[in-house]
Amino acid sequence: MQSIDMSSDEFLNEIEKTKKFTAKVYKQFGWVPHPNEDVNEGVLMGLARHKLLYGKRFCPCYMVVEDDNGKHVSADNRTCPCKVAIEKEIPEDGMCHCGIFCTPEFAEANKQA
């Protein structure tokens, strides 16, 4: 397994790009971040890591595998924001599997005191 120096300029730059990416997704779909900042930070780090390792923001909650041609793919076809999150998880559960994208109603109901 490849490792990434999380204090490197490369990783820190990718985190900033990933924050801009998620901000665009929030705006596009009318979603908001999870009310627990630890959830958002962990997912942002995973998305940035996958982008650096594999060239795509694969969902960090799912395995990345090689297909028959040696190309990296998400085991469950989960590239952020994934179709399952957009069409099923967020409308039905109020948040995606990873938790970084939530409906405003979910976030309000789950605010931490």
Image (tube, helix red, strand yellow):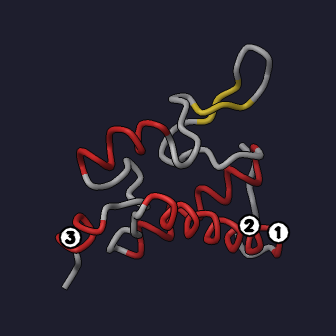
**In the displayed structure image, the side of residue 21 where residue 11 appears, left or right:** right
Residue located beneath label 1 in the image: 10
Residue 14 point in image, percent of width and height = 74, 66
Closer to the N terminus: mark 3 or mark 1? 1
The image quadrant where one finds the N terminus is top right
From the viewer's perspective, is residue 4 above or below residue 79? below
Closer to the N terminus: mark 2 or mark 3? 2
Residue located beneath label 3 in the image: 110
Residue at position x 63%, y 64% from top? 21
Query: Who is closer to the viewer here, 27 or 97?
Result: 27
Marks 2 and 3 sit apart, C-alpha to C-alpha, by 29 Å
Residue 90 point in image, percent of width and height = 33, 49
* Foreground label between 3 and 1: 3
> How many labels, in total?
3
What crowding class fits label 2: few (fewer than 14 Cα within 10 Å), some (14-19), or many (20 or more)?
Answer: some
Residue located beneath label 2 in the image: 14
Q: CB of mark 1 within 8 Å of CB of mark 2?
A: yes
Q: Secondary structure at mark 3?
A: loop
Residue at position x 71%, y 46% from top? 56
Query: Who is closer to the viewer here, 106 or 66?
Result: 106
Marks 3 and 1 sit apart, C-alpha to C-alpha, by 34 Å
What crowding class fits label 3: few (fewer than 14 Cα within 10 Å), some (14-19), or many (20 or more)?
Answer: few
| Residue type pointed to by label 1 | Glu
What crowding class fits label 1: few (fewer than 14 Cα within 10 Å), some (14-19), or many (20 or more)?
Answer: few
From the viewer's perspective, is residue 89 above or below residue 6? above
Marks 1 and 2 sit apart, C-alpha to C-alpha, by 6 Å
Q: CB of mark 3 within 8 Å of CB of mark 1?
A: no
**In the displayed structure image, the side of residue 94 where residue 28 appears, left or right:** right
Q: Secondary structure at mark 1?
A: helix
